[in-house]
Image (spheres, grey):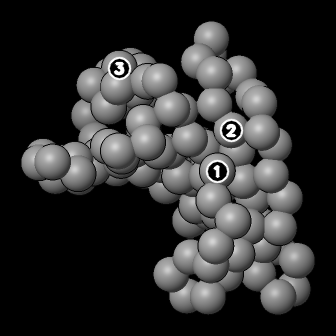
Amino acid sequence: VCSSALAGGAAPRLAIEQVDMVGLHGSTAFVFDGKGSLVQTIVLFPKVEFAQASGMLQGIHGQPTEDRPGTAAVRVWRDEKRHSIVTVTASGAGTLLTYKPL
């Protein structure tokens, strides 16, 4: 998914190269803070279009709380039930989903 440092200096410490989520094939990385707490989950779907991934999330979570159209389109949902923020981003490598705790 990604092996380099993210914004804030954190880097993924655990990665799963092949994962299926709702029939979509991708890879996953988990980012932990210095205390070992999960701070972000990243899922890359290399063959999934932004519209398909965001449509799936809209079916689950309803309307996004944030919608930024454009070349690098972004949609954000706030999942109160699972206490997380879900972001889907159009990427040249496919579609990127990130999950962060609230």
92 displayed left or right of 3: left
Query: Of marks 2 and 1, which one's residue comes earlier in the chain?
Result: 1
73 displayed left or right of 27: left
Query: Of marks 3 and 1, which one's residue comes earlier in the chain?
Result: 1
Above or below, comparing residue 88 to residue 11 in the picture? above
Considering every residue shown, the one lying at the far top of the view is 23
Which residue corresponds to the image point at 63% horizontal and 59% vertical from the top-left?
A: 2
Callouts 3 and 1 close, C-beta under 8 Å: no
For the residue marked with disc 3, what is the amino acid?
Answer: Gln
Image location of residue 3, percent across then percent down: 69, 65
State the CA–CA distance, disc 2 to disc 3: 17 Å
Callouts 2 and 1 close, C-beta under 8 Å: yes
Residue 9 placement: quadrant? bottom right
Please tell me which residue lies in front, 83 or 50: 50
Image location of residue 41, percent across then percent down: 66, 55
For the residue marked with disc 1, what is the amino acid?
Answer: Val
How crowded pointer 2 is (Cα within 10 Å; few <14, some 14-19, many 20+) is rated as some
Q: Which disc, if any, is residue 22?
A: none
The residue that label 2 is drawn on is 27
The residue that label 1 is drawn on is 1
Which residue corresponds to the image point at 75% horizontal and 28% vertical from the top-left?
A: 19
